[in-house]
Image (cartoon, rainbow, N blue to C red):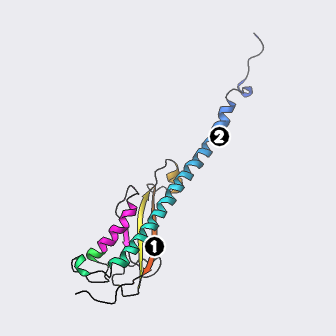
């Protein structure tokens, strides 16, 4: 025998592995959170873009010929006209996988929660699009998006003047 047996307190084998675990787990968690944040911000940009698209569609659709919308009144965000505006908002949101039906409102003020229906010529048309987003990155979804099923409510808003024509449709 070549000496006394080594005690556990003096054992050095495996020290590198323990240090690796101590350093790796926080760094890996940080990386996962960065990936989830990047995906969340991308979804946020898509929702804001959907609001812009819906607003541009609204200023074209609202004053358009009633015959194209089943006789719906001009400058009223209801019926077929509203459906077409919501459809315009849905197209960019189709890249987000889960929830295909956004909530589309026409608030009177920025950040408002009312839903305006009637618009006049030169009125400001404001469209607010709200979309649920499901965070999917393991571990990071609870840190970044919260413990409530990893869902985040994203909201985009845009506005343009209603520059409809000064003539009526026969």
Residue 101 highlighted magenta (yes or no): yes
Earlier sequence position, callout 2 versus callout 1? 2
Residue wearing tag 1: 157
Assess whether residue 170 is covered by the magenta stretch: no
In terms of image quadrants, where is residue 27?
top right
Kindly indicate the quadrant of the structure image that contains residue 57.
bottom left
Region rendered in magenta:
82-109
Q: Is residue 85 left or right of residue 68?
A: right
In the image, residue 136 above or below residue 63: above
Q: Give how far across and how far down residue 38 sits, in percent.
A: 53, 55
Say which residue label 2 marks: 22
Quadrant assignment for the N terminus: top right
Question: Which residue is found at the position 41% from the left and 64% from the top?
Answer: 131
Q: Considering the numbered disc 1 on the image, is that residue within a helix, a strand or a loop? A: strand
Q: Mark 2: few, some, or many residues within 10 Å (few <14, many ≥20)? A: few
Residue at (43, 71) in percent of width and height: 52
Residue 64 relative to residue 7: left or right: left
Between 118 and 65, the one nearer to me in the picture: 65
- Establish if 7 lies above or below 113: above
Report the residue that reaches farthest toward the top: 1
Relative to 154, say whether 59 is above or below.
Answer: below
Badge 1, how many Cα within 10 Å: few under 14, some, many 20+?
Answer: many
Q: Position of residue 128 (x, y in %)?
A: 42, 73
Q: Is residue 13 visible?
A: yes
């Amino acid at each position: 025998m070549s000496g006394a047996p080594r005690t556990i307190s003096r054992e050095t084998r495996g020290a590198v592995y323990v240090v690796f675990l101590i350093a790796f787990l926080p760094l890996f968690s940080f990386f996962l959170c960065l990936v989830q944040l990047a995906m969340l911000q991308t979804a946020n940009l898509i929702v804001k873009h959907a609001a812009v698209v819906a607003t541009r569609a609204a200023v074209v659709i609202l004053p358009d010929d009633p015959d194209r919308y089943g006789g719906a009144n001009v400058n009223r965000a209801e019926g077929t006209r509203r459906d077409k505006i919501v459809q315009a908002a849905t197209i960019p949101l189709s890249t987000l996988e889960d929830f295909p039906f956004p909530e589309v409102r026409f608030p009177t003020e920025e950040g408002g929660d009312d839903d305006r229906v009637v618009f006049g010529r030169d009125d400001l048309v404001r469209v607010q699009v709200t979309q649920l987003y499901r965070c999917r990155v393991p571990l990071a979804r609870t840190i970044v998006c919260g413990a409530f099923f990893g869902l985040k409510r994203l909201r985009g808003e845009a506005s343009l003047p209603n520059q409809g024509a000064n003539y009526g449709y026969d």
